[in-house]
Image (cartoon, rainbow, N blue to C red):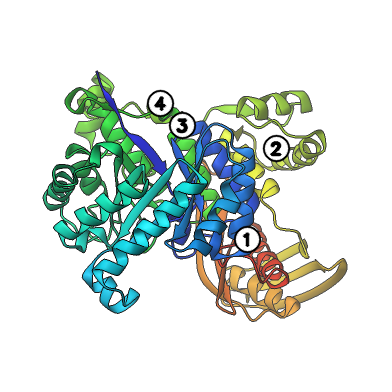
Amino acid sequence: MSERIIIFDTTLRDGEQSPGASMNAGEKLHLALQLEKLGVDVIEAGFPAASEGDFEAVRSIAQKVRHTRIAGLARASKEDIDRAWGAIKEAAHPRIHTFLASSDIHLKYKLKMTREEVINRTVESVRYARSLTDDVEFSTEDGSRSDWDYICRVFEAAIEAGATTINLPDTVGYALPDEFGQMVKYVKDHVPNIHRAVISVHCHNDLGLATANTLAGINAGARQAEVTINGNGERAGNTSLEEIVMALHTRRQYLHLETGIVTQEIYPSSRLVRMITGIPVQPNKAIVGANAFAHEAGIHQDGMLKNPMTYEIMDPEAIGLLHSSLVLGKHSGRHAFKDRLEKMGHSLPEEEINRLFVRFKELADKKKEIVEEDLESMLADELFRTPEIIRLEYLNVISGTVAVPTATVILSIDGEKKQSAGFGVGPIDATYNTIAKMVGTTSRLGRFSVSAITGGMDAQGEVTVRLEENGWTVMGRGTDPDIITAAAKAYVDGLNRLEYRKKHPKLSEHL
Ligand code: KIV
Ligand code: ZN
């Protein structure tokens, strides 16, 4: 009999702490619903005390997600715990996740507290959280750099106060697999009441060891793994969900462990996170990278043709990576379009379908074969659009080997049409200079990335930009078969998000 590992997904909380990861409340809810479909056991929806925006986003997820457990993060204080509870109390299955540092470095320099004071605060906080709900997780921040006997005392006190899950984080990604596994075993063997709680591990990837450390923790007795899609997260990121789940799945005969993950939803979830956050996935990323199932060497290709098992340890279909199939073309009608969206899991109101159908027809005029990825990208463009103060109405760009790159742009700004032209060192620079001048923005372009949504010469280009202004960072995204138009749409999307951010200063930094 295989034992079950609880998958605790923190893409919406630690994952959102990735530099430049930006999700608004609608995007967070959409992702939470996808995580539910993916079959994660716990969704850490956010840190409600961080901002009004985080609170509202967590609340809306707690109201709408009905099957999966929803966790809200809180520092070990009554105010934070009240805020977290306020946001998650309407969830069908709420969990308060509270944390306090346990390493001497953090106690001395950050908390300025003694070891005894930390234990007292742990007990007070866990006890208070437990008075609100039966499901309380307690984490010792910087756990892996803490004294082992001391951390055992903290965990024992937390469990005595009512914690049902105790989490050992490698907050700074410092641990080595063998050492981390031994630490988990030490906790299991030396905390007298450990049988009353689930042991969890939460690893960061600063040394590229997050997955190895998490597996070592599981081997030593942890039964909850804290993970994020694509490994997004603070600094070098967190343990990636897809790596842990597929390691447990692929080596199940060796490990005798299982998860409740619907593995076929892994790739769609990864694509959704990439699309929403604008954070690209490195091509050689395990499981979900573009090259993860690509075989280049002739000898490998030959083996693959004879039998895929020669060089492929996982079936790409097991993670939901189906070869892009032609789904619709320019003669497809509204009924077929609606039907396909429904098969992809999107039941939308009629007016939304009508708007999307107009876009679909425009795209089908330019691109012969419309595949699922095109539809998904169109959906993301439409569904996650920030209220448009600035709209791109017209763009004409001249460039080439001899011409000075020139852009003519018509924008509608607050309903008023404006026209201008400008130059740049290239066509995108000319477009951006012209738009920036017309809007009068002082924002800085922090990142610009472009990729093709599908293969083929007529593939749509997808551009994501990161804009920075007044200490805020926002992402902008645009798709179009014309890459300059995609770049212009991404820039305008980013500018709209900045405008929205200025009008709602209480929202989270991560919008
Ligand atoms: O890395 C960390 O220590 C955390 C805790 C809040 C669990 O994210
Ligand atoms: Zn973390």
Query: Mark 2 and mark 1: span between their CA atoms?
Result: 38 Å
Q: State the SS at label 2.
A: helix
Disc 1 residue type (three-letter): Gly
For residue 53, the mark is 1
Q: Is residue 290 left or right of residue 374?
A: left
Query: Mark 3 and mark 1: span between their CA atoms?
Result: 26 Å
For residue 364, the mark is 2
Pointer 2 local density, CA inside 10 Å: few below 14, some 14–19, many at least 20: some
Q: State the SS at label 1.
A: helix
Q: Which residue is mark 4?
A: 317
Quadrant showing the C terminus: bottom right
Query: Mark 3 and mark 2: span between their CA atoms?
Result: 34 Å
Q: Which residue is mark 3?
A: 39
Disc 4 residue type (three-letter): Glu
Q: Is residue 41 left or right of residue 397?
A: left
> Quick one: label 3 or label 1, which is nearer the N terminus?
3
Q: Nearer the viewer, residue 41 or 491?
A: 41
Disc 2 residue type (three-letter): Ala
Query: Mark 4 and mark 1: span between their CA atoms?
Result: 37 Å
| Picture quadrant where residue 98 is located | bottom left
Pointer 4 local density, CA inside 10 Å: few below 14, some 14–19, many at least 20: few
Work out whether residue 223 can be spotted: no
| Foreground disc of the pair 2, 4 | 4
For residue 374, the mark is none
